[in-house]
Each structure stands twice: as C-alpha cells, then as structure tokens.
Image (cartoon, grey):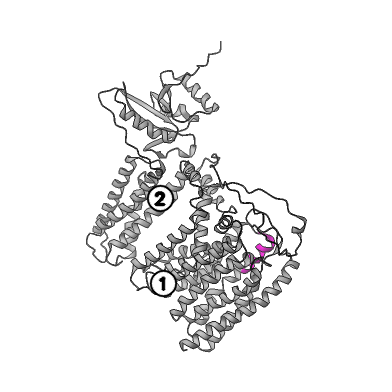
Amino acid sequence: MTLFAALLTVLATGCCALVLSLLFTRLALFALPRLGFLDKPDFQRHIHTVTVPRGGGIGFLLAFLLTVTGAFFLLHLLEREGATATFLAHVAPLAILIPLGLLDDRFTLKARTKFLFQILAAILAWCLGIRLESLFQWNLPPWIGAPLTVLWIVGLINAFNMIDGIDGLAAGVGIISATCLALVAFCRQDLELALFLMALVGSLLGFLRYNWHPAKIFMGDTGSMVIGYLLAAAGLSITERILSIASIGIPLLACGIPILDICLAVWRRLFFNPRPTPERPLASSDTSATIDLEDSFHGLPLPDNEWLPPNSPTHTTFLQRAASILQRLGTADQRHLHHRLLRHFHNNWKKTIGQIYLLAACMGLAAVACSILPGQNLLLALICILGTFSFILNRLAMSMLWSSPESLNLDFHTARTGLILAYFINPIVDLVGLILAYYLASDKGVLAPQDLLRFLFIIEGTLLLSRNYRTFWNFAVLDDFSRLVITLILGFTLARLSEYVFPIRHHIPKLHTCAGGIALSFILAERLFLHYYKNRKTTPTKASPRKPLLRTLLFGITPHLRLYRETIQTQNSRSHREILLGLLAKDPKFIHGYCFGLKVLGTLHNLEKVYQDTPFDKLVLIKPLHPQDRELVQAFAAAHPSVTITTFQTQETPLPLEKKKEAG
C-alpha cells in the first residue's frame, strides 16, 4: 500500500468513526436517563450543579469498536500480517472494562472493586502481548516487565478517570494524545496502530459534540477508563516497535497532562489533609433529568485556604499506618489541575479548557519530536522529556505545588512525612540512582541484566541492613550523611568483590568506581535537598573531655532542638559537658527512628521505661507541654529527684514542679 493510500485509509477510518459516534451518542443521550444513568451533583469531586446523564462513553465506544472491527477485517482481507493479533490484543481487555464502567456509572462501585478489575484487565493485556519488554534498551525479565506493564495501564486508566472533571476535558485531551500517537505510528509506517488510534480520535470528536460546555452528557467511567486503557496499550505498542532509547518518552509526553495530574494527586493526598468542601443543598430543579443550559460553574465552592495541618496520629502499628496512607489515595477532592485552573481563571471554562488543550498539544509535539530523534541519542531525548515536563510544571505549579508552601513546610516536620520518605521515597530514589549509575558507567549498557541485578541486590541489601532507612531524613545531621557514605562505599566494595565469585560476561574497567561516584552524588543530592529544605544548618555536638559528663535526654522534635545542640557546643563556660543520649517524641510514630542524628527512644508515656533502659541526668523540654504531659513529667520528677528537668526556648531555665505529697 502506497503512502497516499495509507493516509486516505487512516483519514477515512477517522471520518467513519466520527459519523457513527454522532449517531450512537445521540441515541445514548435519549436512552441513558430512562435507564437510570444520571449524575447528580455532590460537590465533593464533581462540580456540576445540575443532573446530567452519564455513561455516554458507551456511545463513542460502540462507534470505535464497529470502526476498528471493519478496518481490521479489511486489513485481514488484504493479508496484512499480524492485523488480527493486534486487534485482539488491544480490544479483548475491553470486555472487562466496559461492563465495569457501566456498572459503576449505574450503581457507583467501590474504589477497590474497580481497582481489582482494572488490574485483571491489565494482566489480560499483558498475556495478549501488550507488554513493556525493554526500558532504555534494556531487556526486562517478565517478573519486572509484568508489574511495570500493569502499573502503567492501571495508572493511565485512573489518570483519565481523574481528569474527567469538567466539560470536554477528558475527550479533548484524549483526542490530542491519540492524534500525536497516531502521527508517530503513521510516520513509522505502522498502519494497524495508526488506524486504531484514528478510530479513537474520530469517536471522541463525535462525542465531544455533545460533551462540549454546557455538557448534555457525561462519558462517565465507561468512557474515561477505556480511553486511558486504549492510550496506555497504544503507548506500549509504540515503545515496543520504536527501537530507540527515546521511545519511553513518547507515551509519557503524549499522555503528559493526565500523568501529571495523577502524580500531583498522589502527592497531595499523601502529604496534605484537604479542607472539606462546604456542602450545599440541591435545588429542586437539580433532581430532574432535564438539561439546564445555564453556566454549571456559577458559584463553584473553591475555598482559598486549601490545606489543614496534619491530623494527630491515631494508628500505632506500621501496617495500620500504611493502610491509612493508602486509604487517602482514594479520597475524592476538588483540587485537581482543572479545578485549580478554573479558580485561577475565575470559573472561566473557555480559558481553563484552552490552557489545558494548549499544554497537552505542547507535550504531544514534544512526543513527536522524540520519535524522530537519532536512535541512540539519550541526551537529546532526556533534554526533550525533562524540558517539556519542566515547562508544563512551571505553567501549572501555581495551581498545585506553590499554592501552599506554609502547609508543606508544616507537614515536612511530621512523622508521617518522615515515614513516607524513609520507607518509600528514599528506597526508590536509591534504586533509580543505582540503575542510572551502572548504566552510565557501563560501556553503552553492555552490562548483563543478571549481573546488574546481583550488584543492586548487594548494595540495596547493605543499605537495608544499615540504619539508612530508619533515619528520618527531614531531621538528619552530619552523622547520618557520614553513615550513608560509608554504607554506600561498603556496598560497592562488596559488589566488586562478588566478581571474583561470579565473573561478569564483559569486563568493564573501573565499573564500580564510576558507578559508585555517580550513585553517591545522586543519592547525597536527594538527601541534602531534604536536609536543606528550609535552609537549616546543624553541627555535631562536641565537648571538652576535661569537664564531667552530663547525660541528657531531649523532648520535642522542633527546630529549637538544632539550636540547643549548637548552644551546648558554643557555650564553653558550662560546668558540665553534655552527651545527648536520645529524644522523646510527642508522636509515637517517631519511635526507633533517627531525627537530627539522635535516636527516638520513646514518648512521655513510657518515660519511666526509657529511664530504666537508658539512665539520664537531665531532661530538657524543647517543646511546650500539654496539661496531661505536664502531669507525666511531674510524676517522674517526684519519683526521680536527682534528675534535672529544664525547658529550653531561647535560653535554658529550671522548670518549677510541685512534688506530690505522700498520703498519710
């Protein structure tokens, strides 16, 4: 088939899908309200103020399925090799997602139920050949490729589900993303994938006719989940067929807006407590199925003060804390990118949708640019990918990242943030840093995957056996950084020694030395960013050995703790030299962690046990006491009169405490 004939075929497929979508969406607009598919305003996640039919995605999906079935049947008659297999691999998982979406639009299923079936659909796609088999030209083993494939598909399904929040947004972004991927596929002479994507573009254009503001119908989860899946599958197919290290950036950029939104949503729901949106009673006209053509965004309740301080801890075990953190991910809110842009543009829908379309188009053009880069030029690909994402973040940062810096700083001092950093963020950063380090240190990536996995296992095992992941790096000091450097050096030394037992296939000179320097710089940069987040500085406590020893325990994890350490170092006129034994924390989640280089031994509730395990001569209260905490300290002071108890704010002063009189 000539290039011109292929182009006509692709355009004809899109036009056919457009006509069928207009017809089926019109029928859905008539039938869905009578079947109970109605979306009533709840002011929690959805912001419309009138009742609108939902589940309209079934209209453009029928058009899409009929169009691609006919197109691939024609390709089969023309004896195009692999057309049938491509069709089945991309379409078969819809047998799970379409009924799931319809049931959710009609009965509102639980989030975990939808998540389970989304995973099943992703596993089915992987079994049918929709796979991520290589990453930056590294062949991935199935036990790594399969989870990454499922994560990509499920993540993009939920990403498009999240952005389906205002009229025409999900459909418009889907059109832009599918058009960019279709252009890449057509330029690569992949006719099957180009037909598949153009059928999706035409179907969404027909649906957008009825979803344009003011929307007469919503696509619901039936449409948004399927759009996310189809684009995820197409992105994986392009990544597999474009054998270059730039290929991974093409689907990331083409679907960049939904990906950014879901990443920011995860960040927001993990690190912040959203202020609840005020509830409003529904008007009597809102309960009918009649479409109100008035501006559905009038009077949108978007409070200026977005965030509340973190809640007090209610869970004690690690599993309970992890379950609580994961539960926050399913919390609906009105703080997505489109919600915040609506508020920024004073509820002007046209400016909001135009801004998002423009940014999505910029990312799509960057995706096309990545597809025509020289095959081995990793540097240009990374510059294109990172530069585009940085530009988009700069445009949207005012809507998310920089609107609540005070709350972010507040939350950065909590145990929950320390746990997320220690148990989740830092291990991922370390693993990514090690992989990049060995890739850059090897000769064009000739290091065998099994050798790389052995080195990663040794170094990560060394980090796990150290206290690196028990340190709260938002409260780290110089001792923690020294320990991290020593641990990494030891890990790379053990990895080098392992070559004497299991020699690698291709000898690479100075492999571990170069990789160690790169990884050490990368990991230290991440830890130092946490350390200097608020431009703090700390100095380890040292004292003159000529003075007698005073064992001190501190209560309270605040910036004053750093000031106290510096104070006992600089005041040479003290009659005692002090050694800091550890900390007492208000939050029990800090226990056994390390803050400011000191171990958290307990709380005021187990002060007596801490004293028995680690005797101390002085207790310094850095943080103000609540009445119940004051009673605990007073009881301890009565039982141990030899222990000096002081407070520290700008200076250290004795704390007067009344001793309880013994009865009788």
Farthest residue in the left direction? Answer: 509
Query: Which circle marks residue 369 in the picture?
Result: 1
The answer to whether 110 appears left or right of 234 in the picture is: right
- Report the magenta stretch's main SS: helix
* Residue designated by label 2: 426
> Residue 468 occupies which quadrant of the picture?
top left
Determine if residue 544 is in view: yes
Above or below residue 3? Residue 417 is above
The answer to whether 586 appears left or right of 170 in the picture is: left
Query: Start and end of the magenta stretch?
Result: 98-108
Place of residue 458 in the rendered image (x, y in percent of width and height, measured from the top left):
32, 54
Distance CA(mark 2)–CA(mark 1)? 33 Å
Residue at left 53%, top 69%? 124
Q: Amino acid at mark 1?
A: Ala
Is 449 in the magenta? no
Query: Which circle marks residue 380 in the picture?
Result: none
Q: Secondary structure at mark 1?
A: helix
Place of residue 26 in the rendered image (x, y in percent of width and height, measured from the top left):
69, 74
Is 106 in the magenta? yes
Q: Secondary structure at mark 2?
A: helix
Above or below residue 1? Residue 622 is above
Residue at left 43%, top 18%? 641
Place of residue 192 in the rendered image (x, y in percent of width and height, measured from the top left):
50, 80
Q: Earlier in the sequence, mark 2 or mark 1?
A: 1
Q: Quadrant of the C terminus?
A: top right
Farthest residue in the top direction? Answer: 664
Place of residue 506 in the rendered image (x, y in percent of width and height, measured from the top left):
25, 66
Residue at left 70%, top 50%? 280
